[in-house]
Amino acid sequence: MSSTALGNHILVEFMNCDPHVMNDVAAIERDMVGAARKAEATVINSTFHHFSPYGVSGVVVIQESHLAIHTWPEYGYAAVDVFTCGDMNAWIAFDHLKECFGAKSYSAIEMKRGSVNLLTRNDFDITTAREKAAEWRNPDFYTRNVWFTDKDEDQALSLRFTGDVFFDVQSPFQRVRILESTKYGKMLALDDMVMTTIKDEFHYHEMISHPSLFTLQNAKNVLVIGGGDGGTVREVLRHSNIEKVTMVEIDGEVIKACKEHLPEIAAAFDDPRLELIVDDGIAYVKNAPDAIYDLLIVDGSDPVGPAEGLFSVEFYQNCYRTLKADGILVAQGESPKFNEKAFSELNQTLQGIFGKENAPVGLFFVPTYPTGMWSFQYGLKGAADPRKVTNTEVIKSFVAEKGLRYYNEDIHFSTFALPNFVKQLIQQ
Ligand code: SPD
C-alpha cells in the first residue's frame, strides 16, 4: 500500500463468464465472501439481491472497505469493484473471482483513493468508538442479506433468504429450486418465480380446493393438472367422499424436490386414492373421455414456460368436455394487480366456454406472490354454484375438525366479492 493514499480501488470487467453462475445469487454471494476471506479481509456484512429473470447485485462490507458486484447473465458479464485499505491485497480477491465465474476475458483498472496530499488530517479522540467496536465485533460472525426477487418490468416481490439452496436442478422444463426464506421458511421456486412457501402455502391450497368441493358436496372423481408440490391433492384428499384423484404433473423434478424438502406440503402422495402421472397435462385432458370428472383443478404456474398452454382456449374446451354435467373447473387465475392481461384473458376464455354467468372469480391473499392479491377462476358447467351454497354448518365442522387455517364458511362467500376494478377487468 502506497503511503500517499488511504485506499486502493480496483474496477474489474469480467467477461464471457458462465451465465448460470452470473444469475445465481447464492453462488455469487458465496464467491464474493470467499474472495474477501481469501484476501484475508474481515467480513462484516453481505447483502445480495437477485433480479428476475436476470441479474444479481451485491456488496460485501469488510473491515478494510468493500467488494461490490453487478451481473448481466445474458451477456456473461460482471462489473466488480474491490476497495481496500491497509495491507489487504485486492488482486487475491480478483484471482479468486476470475476462477469462480469462469471468466474467459477480463480487464481491470487500479486507482489509489484518498490521496493524503489532498487531505488534511484532523486527529480526534476515538477511544470510546474503539471500545464500542471491540464490544460487538466477532470475527467469526457476519450477517447475510440475500434476496430472491420475483418481478416483471414494473413490480417486484422480494423475500430475504438464508442464501442456502437445498435443491437446484435444471429440468427439461424449468429451473427447480428449494431455497429457505427467512420469514416464510422453505420455498419452491420455478424459474425465479415463487410457487409456494411453507408458511403461506395453506392460503393457496385450501382456497383452490375447498370452495368447489363444498359446492359439489359429493364429488368422487377429481383431476388435478400440475400441482407438483402436492399441496392441492393434500387438501382434496381431506374429503372422505373423494374416491379417486388423478394428478398429472409435467415435471418429475418438482415432485422429487418437494417430497425431499417440503414434506409438509407433499404429504398425501402415498394416499391410495391418488394416481400420480408424470406427463403433459394438456395432452392428458385432450385424450381424456367425455364427462368423467366432478372437479378439474388446474394448479399451474404463471403463463410462461411449460404452463403457457394452461391458458389456451383449446385446453379449457377439453376441460369442459371432460367434466360431468354438474362439474366444476377451478384454475389458478393470476393476479388482477400483477398480471391484469393474463387474468382478464383467462376469464374471457372461461366466459366464452362456460357462459358469462358461469365464470366467477374468487380472490384471496398470498403474501409471497407479487402484489399479494391472487385469484382462482371457475368454470361452472351445470347448476352447482359456489356462490349459492347453503351447507355452512357442514363447512364449519369440517374446518374445525381438519384445523384449516385460511378457508372457512365466511371466506367461502367473501372470496367472490370483487372490487370494482376487478369487475371491470372481467366485464361483470
Ligand atoms: N406466481 C405464482 C402462481 C401460482 C403458481 N401455482 C403455485 C403452485 C402451488 N401448488
Image: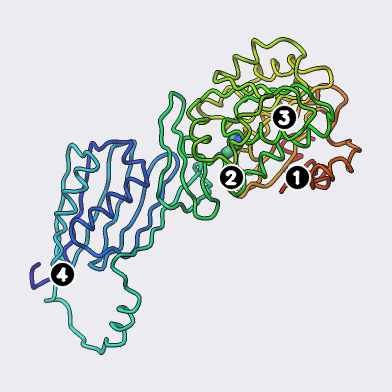
Q: Looking at the picture, tell me which residue is in the foreground, 75 or 176.
A: 176
Amino acid beneath label 2: Tyr
Q: Read off the residue under disc 2.
A: 369
Label ID, residue 86: 4
Horizontal relation, residue 148 to residue 405: left or right? left
Q: Which numbered disc flags the more N-terminal residue, 1 or 3?
A: 3
Q: Callout 1: helix, strand or loop?
A: loop
Amino acid beneath label 4: Gly
Does residue 302 sit above or below 14 in this rendering?
above
Colour setup of the view = rainbow
Q: Which numbered disc flags the more N-terminal residue, 1 or 2?
A: 2
Residue sitting at 21 percent across and 86 percent down?
A: 122
Q: Looking at the picture, tell me which residue is in the foreground, 300 or 209.
A: 209
Q: Which numbered disc flags the more N-terminal residue, 3 or 2?
A: 3
Label ID, residue 330: 3
Q: Callout 2: helix, strand or loop?
A: loop
Q: Is mark 4 within 8 Å of ligand 1?
A: no
Q: CA distance from mark 3 to mark 4?
A: 63 Å
Label ID, residue 36: none
Q: CA distance from mark 3 to mark 2?
A: 19 Å
Q: Report the number of discs.
A: 4
Horizontal relation, residue 37 to residue 328: left or right? left
Q: Read off the residue under disc 1.
A: 407
Residue 215, how many percent across, how many down? 84, 32
Amino acid beneath label 3: Val
Residue 167, how many percent across, how many down? 43, 38
Q: CA distance from mark 1 to mark 2?
A: 18 Å
The quadrant the C terminus occupies is top right
